[in-house]
Image (cartoon, rainbow, N blue to C red):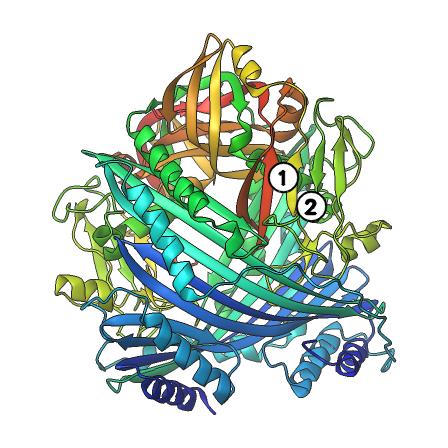
Amino acid sequence: MNPQELVQAGIQQAERAGADQAEAFFLEHSSLTIEVRGGRLETLRQSKECGIGLRVLKGGSLGYAFTSDLSSRALADAAREAVANAGYVAPDPARTLPLPATTDPSRAQHDPVISDVPISAKIDLALAIERAAFAEDKRVTKSERAAYEEVEYRVAIGNSHGLQVSYRGNFCGGYAWVVAEADGDAETGSGLAYTTRFGELDPEAIGREAAREAVRLLGAKPISTQKLALVLPPQTASQLLGILAPALTAEAVQKKRSLFAGRLGEQVASDVVTIVDDGTLPGGINTSPVDGEGVPTQRTVLVSAGVLEAFLHNSYTAAKEGTRSTGNGMRSSFKGAPEVGPTNMFFVPGQVRPEDLLAGVDKGLYVCDLLGTHTANPISGDFSLGATGILIEKGRFTRPVRGVVIAGNVVGLLKEVQAVASDLRFYLGFGSPTLLVQPLTVSGE
Amino acid sequence: MLLTRSDVEVILGEALAGGGDLAEIFVERRRTNTISLEGERIEKVNSGLDQGAGIRLLAGESSIYVFTNDLSLAGLKTAAQTAAAALAEGKAGRRLIRLGSADDAPPPPVRKGDMRDKVAIVAAAEKEARAAGDAIRQVMVSYGDNEQEILVANTNGRVATDRRYRTTLVINVVAGDGSNVQTGYESLGGTQGLELLSVDKVRELGARAARRALLLLRARPAPAGRMAVVMAGEAGGTMIHEACGHGLEADIVGKEMSVYAGKLGQRVASELVTVIDDPTLPGKYGSYSCDDEGTPAQKTVLIENGILKTYMYDLEWARRQGKSSTGNGRRQSFHFPPIPRMSNTYLAPGDVHPEEIIARTERGLLVKRMGGGQVNPTTGDFVFEVAEGYLIERGKITVPVRGATLSGNGPQALMAVDLVGNDLGFAIGTCGKDGQGVPVSDAQPTIRIPELVVGGLL
């Protein structure tokens, strides 16, 4: 059976097992990862898997089951399990399946070149990343890993309302982690880029970036506790969005787990901060015609000039508030129902060039790396992160720093953003330009 | 068996047809059940079946991994041929593979129960947590079980099967007082069924999570600076796992990314420190009878009285370094190749009573619960958050503090350990490495590190 037929069979089986309404979600996911080290192929991983998830409604309760065994017997078992599971779940009138809507198939991000290029050329590409890192600076002594990676997916979604949509997409990327050594000190650096267009992948740029990042930290030492302005380049600033994103979902708000709950219309960030989620962004890694339950994607302004404007919704959170889904019903696998999550989320860039922004800093820390961002408390927004960076004095880099801790609250930090540069860059689904944050206490020795 | 012996032999023969040193097939069938409760309601009940196979080919220092969930003989042969083609050495020709015999002991029986029993456990935990006080705003409970059947075979003739049944219960509590919002977390897990989750234990777990959230509401912001840190046994061994264990994994060592590289036989920790990895502990969350390459599980002493004894090996890194596998080759699922991983890792108990350790500390931070953390294995630098901490002043526990983090250097901290308690507390977790999560547990007695950097709320 093709994906569309499987989806229809899944819906029929679930209805036969007693579901009032049913949805079937089919995902086929293929990937290729090539890792090289020391000029040789180290690992090659290739995968292809598919599966189907069934979401059913019975008596207002939702049940779920999935299988990667696509035989009709396994599909029937899953349908029965989904209906039985619904029997244990509390009924909820907001549990609905979306109605069919007009979609724009051109939003599918599919570049046939990605799958057409032979594997040998992709191995060469990974090798070129590593070579570029070593060529950039003599102090680069080791390569932990340089890699080429690609992902391809095919999605089919259908439900009892007659919604029926399918699309496919892919993206590719590369990364490098290298070690630089000098005078007994060793530092790591990484370079990384992902794109939906094979032709845009620049292996030399990735290798050079990894080398520069490692070298610039050589000789890093702790500093005393002091107040410093923070300059967060795209790589570290985009990590802040990883902490913020859950709090910007209606799911977190409704579950009283968001620090933004009840604050729509309020100033939650300084007026230079605008945050957007855009599932239609041309070339975005997470751009697609529809979300994980078949609702068309859109551009949503979450924070506009510092004012909280909106939250992200899927069909369920929208139904609870009598509003429309923003097309953020995300699902990364067939093994679960859609949650609410960001697509391509980013800080909207400003006008100033990052080097000009830096030149105006009297005493600051250029933050190269943040350790432990996943430990930040998504509910309170409190964080305490280890950091490495470069000290800025009178607008210039003076010396590398390690072993410092930056602690605070992510909303507090947003209010202290003084300037936003023009250099927007994406790291998979999160993007940011360089941000300048007003002086705060950096704890060191 | 998930596949017949002759099918396995045919598939391994195909995989090695293009050359290579070792071919392996890992077949897995996993049934899972999850329940989540939130907002005083059972929100989700999910059941699933996931099956697939991964074929691995090792050649020199290269490794190829292809996986599929098409378990038909034709599908697996295609996957094997894909792997052989990726190696593209274009020689060898088909090889005849003969498997040895599998002598796997049947796993101990577990009480599986039905969905109704599991839902009742979740509800009991929630009720107890909610009853802890008016300031409790949210209680989230999640239950999960999975039964994993595996078959692994390789061209050395090794063939093994294992059946692992794991159960977990996780409780998150949010407490609030005006705009002050704090959370408490507890979890329990093991290679056991519902016998792990007695009503008493489940209630106790719910109450503990709630107490922690309430405690943090009245906690003071943690001080910042250098001070003595006492880590209670009940904090679990997160620090040992993160700040020491990862650096003892043979792949990290072999890539010269570990501070412990080249230090076998040398003093790497205080002589009070003995670190052990042991997947044979019965019922623990990181336990197994054979690893995911079919190597029998074994207890491995990594550091003995401060001296580095061995690293943790899987087959590939053992082969590269001329060692034997220590039975630490693990993978999240058939989607991933095995890599050296910890199982149940612990710092062995000493002989000092935990209360004495506190009494002998003039000023410091007592850590009763660790949060998440991150480590740079190359330098050994770490940062951990403290989920439950107290000030120690003049040898006594005084006030609870929140928002503390510990940062320091793993090897330096282990070298500095100056008191080791006679208790041992376990914590469970899902350890992430190279994008793979595997179930682990870690443990430690109460220990004192004379000085660490504590980052507080500013």
- Real-space Cα distance between discs 1 and 2? 8 Å
Q: Percent from the top left, x then y, of residue A17?
A: 35, 85
For disc 2, the chain is B
Please give the label number shown on residue B214: none
Q: Residue at x 31, y 83 (%)?
A: A18
Label 1 marks which chain's residue? B
Q: Residue at x 66, y 50 (%)?
A: B341
Q: Could you tell whether B371 is left or right of B319 in the image? A: left
Residue plotted at (40% across, 81% down): A79
Q: Is A240 left, or right, of B144 in this rendering?
A: left
Secondary structure category for the residue under label 1: loop
Residue B32 at x, y = what percent? 50, 66
Q: Which residue is mark 2?
A: B252
Give me the residue at 53% from left, 75% from top: A114
One can see residue A422 in this view:
no
- Amino acid type, callout 2: Ile
Q: Quadrant of residue B382?
A: top right
* Disc 2 secondary structure class: helix
Residue to which mark 1 is pinned: B377
Quadrant in which residue A294 is drawn: bottom left
Q: Nearer the viewer, residue B72 or B413?
A: B72
* Residue B394 versus residue A35 in the image, above or below: above
